[in-house]
Image (cartoon, rainbow, N blue to C red):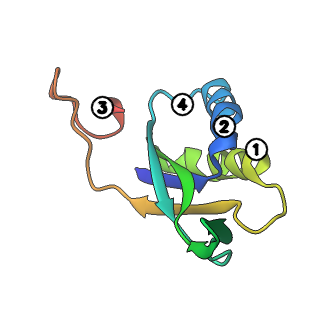
Amino acid sequence: MKQVCAIVRPEMLEPLKDVLMEAGVTGMTVSEVQGFGHQHGWKEYYRGTEVLLNMVPKVQVMLVVTDDEVDALVSKICGVAQTGEVGDGKIFVYPVEDAIRIRTSERGDTAL
């Protein structure tokens, strides 16, 4: 099993959810997050003073899937979220040791 964590632009959430549901994803967790990468934020003026806003709003989508689903899902996420501009986001893939469905005590891939 693998955890796929995608951090994308907020406006990409709805199209991304649609693609993931069409792909048969059975569950996901979505969080509003803030951070910065290469774009380092932007400058705005507040009451005549320049302010650097370096915490950019993003959306984090977390999925746990079987090993054989990872490459296809990463391709689908990139296909939806990629604009070609700085700030498109990142995808991280982590190994997952186990999963347990609390209601039934199922473990492993069947718990997904």
Q: Nearer the viewer, residue 108 or 49?
A: 49
Question: Relative to 89, is 71 above or below?
Answer: above
Q: Residue at x 46, y 46 (%)?
A: 32
- Asked if residue 51 lies left or right of residue 81, the reply is left
Q: Position of residue 70 (x, y in %)?
A: 57, 50
Q: CA distance from mark 3 to mark 2?
A: 24 Å
Question: Mark on residue 80?
Answer: 1
Q: Nearer the viewer, residue 41 or 93?
A: 41
**Residue indicated by mark 2:** 16
Mark 3 is on which residue type?
A: Ala
Mark 2 is on which residue type?
A: Leu
Residue extending farthest to the front is 47
Q: Are marks 3 and 2 in contact (CB under 8 Å)?
A: no
- Asked if residue 94 lies left or right of residue 6, the reply is left
Q: Assign a secondary structure to mark 2.
A: helix
Q: Are marks 1 and 2 in contact (CB under 8 Å)?
A: yes
**Residue indicated by mark 4:** 25
Q: Residue at x 76, y 44 (%)?
A: 80
Q: CA distance from mark 1 to mark 2?
A: 6 Å
Q: Mark 3 vs mark 1: give the one in front.
A: 1
Question: Relative to 92, is 28 above or below?
Answer: above
The C terminus sits in image quarter:
top left
Q: Nearer the viewer, residue 90 or 85?
A: 85
Q: Nearer the viewer, residue 14 or 6?
A: 14
Q: CA distance from mark 3 to mark 1?
A: 28 Å
**Residue indicated by mark 3:** 111
Q: Are marks 4 and 2 in contact (CB under 8 Å)?
A: no
